[in-house]
Amino acid sequence: MPSAMRQPILPFDAVPPAAAGALEAAACERARGLLEAWRRWPGRALVLAGGDAATRTVLADGWLQAADGQRWQAGAPCPRGAAVWVEGQGHDTQALFALLSRAEAGEAFVLLTDAVPPRQWDTVLSDLRSRLLSVPVEMLPVPDTAFLERLLAAHLLQLRIEPVPAALKWLAERIAPDYASPRAVAVALADVTGLSRRPGRGELAAALAQAPAQAAFGGDFEAGAGD
């Protein structure tokens, strides 16, 4: 086992958001059900909060296609369509109040997404704050360690890398508890170790047992160790 290895910087920001896979769909099953039933939203509005930005985007994009809607990003004029995805905070407060009023009047559907629910948003317009607090909120679940192991294993297999349980557990206990990090780590490991260019299953299993921690984290991982 090499005694000293260079510790690279994992390119999390350079990795495109992963598409919604079967595991992510299962974890967000309740949110997907609410989005599919968008025509029955109380007040024609819903807040999707928490989770990972990439996962919120995947869910919202799916809703936009189903509802033939438009995306409203902070700093841009409010779309005039009948279905609008309000991404994040920082929008024109008067325009947002008018949009929610249109929804309440039955003239539009509004999906709002952010890392935190509206009660934690910064808004000085009291009428808007009251309107936001009346919108139902669906909090996305935070992946636990067991789920992160499963998701990381799925991404490694997709990259033709055979997962090793000890390595998966070590990584799952240290990466960010979100939906994007397992994909980012898998892609980074494939690039750092060169495993994606050497797809022999036996060779991959032996190399991955020591590669993740040492090559990607420069840490104290021992092959087969549980901590």
Image (spheres, helix red, strand yellow):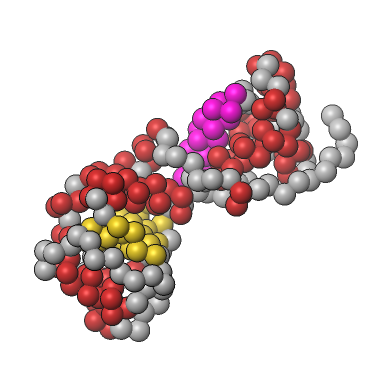
Q: Position of residue 115 (x, y in %)?
A: 43, 61
**Residue 147 magenta:** yes
Main secondary-structure element of the magenta-colored stretch:
helix
Q: Position of residue 102 (x, y in %)?
A: 17, 69
- What residue is drawn where x is 20% and y is 51%? 38
- What residue is drawn where x is 51% and y is 30%? 154
- What residue is drawn where x is 17% and y is 56%? 41
As drawn, the residue found furthest toward the left would be 105
Toward which corner of the image does residue 201 lie, by quadrant?
top right
- Viewer-proximal residue, 178 or 188? 188
Q: Position of residue 147 (x, y in %)?
A: 48, 38
Tell me, yes or no, if residue 166 can be seen here: yes
* Image vertical order of residue 164 relative to residue 136, above or below: above
**Residue 142 magenta:** yes
- Viewer-proximal residue, 5 or 94? 94
* Image vertical order of residue 204 relative to residue 116, above or below: above
- What residue is drawn where x is 31% and y is 41%? 29
Q: Is residue 172 left or right of residue 85?
A: right
Q: Quadrant of the N terminus?
A: top right
Q: Is residue 168 left or right of residue 147?
A: right
Q: Position of residue 4 (x, y in %)?
A: 87, 40
Q: Quadrant of the C terminus?
A: top right
Tell me, yes or no, if residue 47 can be seen here: no
* Image vertical order of residue 1 relative to residue 42, above or below: above
Count numbered badges in the picture: 0
As drawn, the residue found furthest toward the right would be 3
**Where does the magenta region start and end?**
141-160
